[in-house]
Image (spheres, coloured by chain):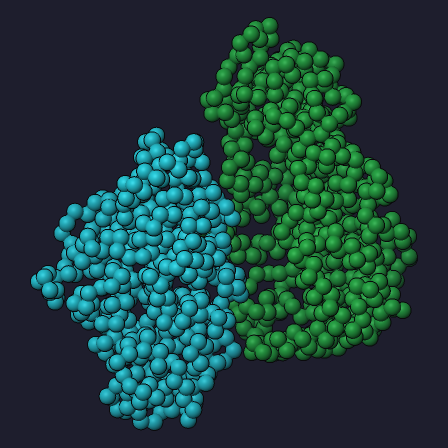
Amino acid sequence: MKRNDAGERPFAAFSGVFDADAARHLLRRAGIGARPSRVADLVAAGLPSAVSMLFEPDLGPTGLARFAAHRATSDVTALAAYWIACMLRSRDGVHEKLALFWHGHFATSNDKVDEPARMLAQLEVFARLGASRFAPLLEAVAVDPAMLILLDAEKNRRGQPNENFARELFELFTLGIGHYDERDVAEAARAFTGFRRAGDRFEFVPAMHDDGEKEVLGHRGRLGPAEVLAMAARHPATARRLARALLRFYGDRDPAAVDVLAFATLLVELELDVGEALRRLFASTWFFAGARRAARIASPVEFAIGALRSLELRADASALVGELTAMGQSLLRPPTVAGWEGEAGFVSAGTMLARARFASRLAAGEDRLRLGDLPSPDDLDAANDDESLVAALETRLLAARLEPAVREAACRTLAGCRGAARVAAALRVVLSCPEASLV
Amino acid sequence: MSPIAHVLRMALALQAPSDGAADAPPWLVAPPIRVTAHGLDRAVAALVASPAWRDLHTSAAFVAARRDGELRELEAGLRFVAAAARTDLAGLFDLVLGAEIDFVAAVAGEPPQWRLVLRFADAARAERVFVVLDQALAFALRGQRKGDVAGALDLDVRSAGEQEFHARIGRVVCVASSVAAVRTATRDAPGDVPGGPAHRIAFEVDLAALRRDAEDADDAGKPTRDEPLPRLLWDHTLAVLRGGEILTGEIRFAAAEATPRIELDVKAQGAAIVPPEWDVAAGDALPPFEPGSLPAFLAELRVHRDFAAFYRARDRWLREEDENAFLQLDGGLSLFFGGRSFGDEVLPALGDAASLLVTVDDAMLASVSRPSPLLPGFTLVVPYDPRGLDAEELLIAFQTTIGIVNADRAQNGKDALRLESLERHGVEVAAARFRTPRDAAPESPLAIRYNAEPALATHGDVLLLGSRSDGVFAALDALVAASSQHPRPKAEPGLLALRLEFAPLRRLLAANHSALVGDRMIDHGEDERSATRAVDLFLAALDALQRFDLELRGGPDSASITAALDLRAAGASPGAPAPGTTR
């Protein structure tokens, strides 16, 4: 494994103390939110076992799919709600978060697809193959009907190639700009000809496929889809591009080039087994370094769903769809084919106000954003004083600690509040702080 | 609010104050809502012995499961009290409901004033209930009970909170909002409880006073729900009752019958109760056909109303923000009728009655490629005046509608509907169907029966419009069968009548079991086990029910609702189709 500038092996196993703070960091980054019961379980298990526990089979999108199919396949808002319900219901949210990563990577919008059933099928592909090697996932996505609709596969015919899929394959899904040229795109487009829609399915029709000789990424031959996808997947630039995307999504808003290179090397060693690479990442020195704590801006999913999960609250998932949209993350409708920019891309005056409004409405229990009561101070392990209550909520909800002055101000807002209203007031103020948007 | 008052108000769904009632106790400054009940122990005992009891109990559990707070606590409280009384829930009902019950409340002011008097046949039973009550209040208040009231040594008055005092004297138990009220009640109670027939609960509400005290006059007069359809069906309908001066009602139990039945009669009296558009002077304009004979009949909603007048008075039932959309709809509808004004020309040609028939269909959503839930089918039966609106115009409007739908579907790359002309009893039925092969093998994915393949027919002066041609055929069968029989006198028209059969409804919902579970998982954040339990309990509750009938009638100075809920008959199996019915 490569060493960084300091001569360290950044992705070597973490040997520090794996305490409750570290477990919360692990849960918030690998999954969505940190449920107190899971924090205790992971600490008791120790880091290596804890990471294995995260990846154990869970509900997964397909768990709800058989129940929700009737709504999810006809109404994209219902499908988004179904996915959110999975995020809320799952054990740690690890599988759902990985599906969200791939949803941003292979960004497919129902605005173009206009068939929620296809979007659900694509989510199921991410759930099934997202934590395995990259090549099979790429192959599955390349024949995924939603992707074929998104990138106009039907218009890609022998003699009249449409370059949309080939271009996005190289630019966004694998190599990245600078590692291919226009000729590669044009030739690869020919390799992907031959898909035709047949009722509910897409089928490959050999007679419609351009099986002539092509040259792609320096390889010449009668290349078909499988050959082009395999070349793109094993290209060194793909490992680097994937490495940066994963480190940015899970670890650091701007990972150092040397760390990206080291993680790319690890990915190549693991034959681009993303699941295994993430296991190494989540158990690494790099992941638990102080510089990685509270070092990212939480996505709306991490912020809102994470808060609900950390407080062990139930919610009407349908009500959360609009909340996430207001915060800038409209599930199943990514803004561009490049997905969400993430980090500062989620921050604007409007979206931050939406986060504050969510905090307020969650605390008040409005619009079914939470079902059931807020935890009591006892549930939060808080003493009777206001400072203890605020501190308890900080621990539950925030990756960062509040400045003393901010904490004092938060406590002042609780003056005169009693019982459940006091917890609600504390929740509103803690979740409205900028620190609540760090993860 | 005190626990008992809270529970009673939930049960009665009555809010807000009233003033003045001749027989109200003098301590009650602004009475009242008055509820009296007699002989409930016998009704409940018979109910407990009926086959529907288990399912009704699961129904209560389902309701409790749906409500996170209050009802769950109530159920837990009932169980606690039953345990304290060393009896089961049915025994508890027998114990408590063995009394003649008199409840009077004035909800105005702070603290609210109310009084509940239970008069028992013997002192021993009263003593036992008093102990149980003490336990119940202790449970409800979670240890905040204060115990004996100082200075009330002449009477064993207990305090169970700031506004809850209870006492027993002889065979009378009283719970009230003040010590003074308890004293008055226990002094007067032996001769103060009015008598009445058994198995009944009677209530009386001063509606005029409720309206006067409503905080927002707009809220009282205008529907408040967000969704237009529930507003139209529910709020506007209930406005007929809300418009009265005095509301009286009675709930009767006939639990000893083979088919246990709960009947409700509510009557509102006062001037100008029924809005003009409701005033249907003519007889029943619907042909006397038998809806219960339709295959898989689930429900029928009959409405008698002057639709044109109702349309003109839309500002009374539409919110301001909806009215512009409504005007656009009006303009759009005119396009379907050759430019004729829908409100001024088309609607007056339709009769003042409509029947919406609902059946259990085995069709699927047209837009869904995966198995979709079993859906109901709908058929609308509307009399019309051929002199104002001929059958040809109706057919053209139908064809225009299908054409527009097809244009939209074609733009989105979806299958188009094709128009077909079918025939039944010599009547031409215009049907729109998808182009999927009709001869596809049953297991073929193409062998889909779509739920939205509309059809239209005219039979005499009756228009039939259905979500599928099957429904129109069945309605035509019923019409033809009725016309071949001896003509029956047309019934006195009610303003609205609803019949609902629970066995087909249960079958419909059971077929969508997994979808209902999914809905709960998404909307209520429940896990699969909990969601499945809730759905199973709901279906079990439906097993207890057989049929629901509701009728709303109105005249110049009164309006009434009669409702009857038939529970499952002894020996009937859950989910079995209900026997045929005659209206």
Residue at figure coordinates x 40%, y 65% from the top left: A124
Observer-nearest of B109 and B402: B109
Q: Chain letter for cyan?
A: A
Residue at figure coordinates x 54%, y 73% from the top left: B445
Q: Position of A312 compared to B550: left or right?
A: left
Residue B385 is situated, as x and y percent measured from the top left of the image, at 87, 65
Whether residue A292 is visible here, answered yes or no, is yes
Q: Where the N terminus of chain B falls, by quadrant? A: top right
Whether residue B49 is visible here, answered yes or no, is no
Quarter assignment of residue A194: bottom left
Residue A171 is situated, as x and y percent measured from the top left of the image, at 32, 78
Residue B5 is situated, as x and y percent measured from the top left of the image, at 60, 27
Q: Reply above or below: A191 against A248.
A: below
Residue at figure coordinates x 70%, y 59% from the top left: B323
Observer-nearest of B316 and A352: A352
Q: Colour of chain B?
A: green
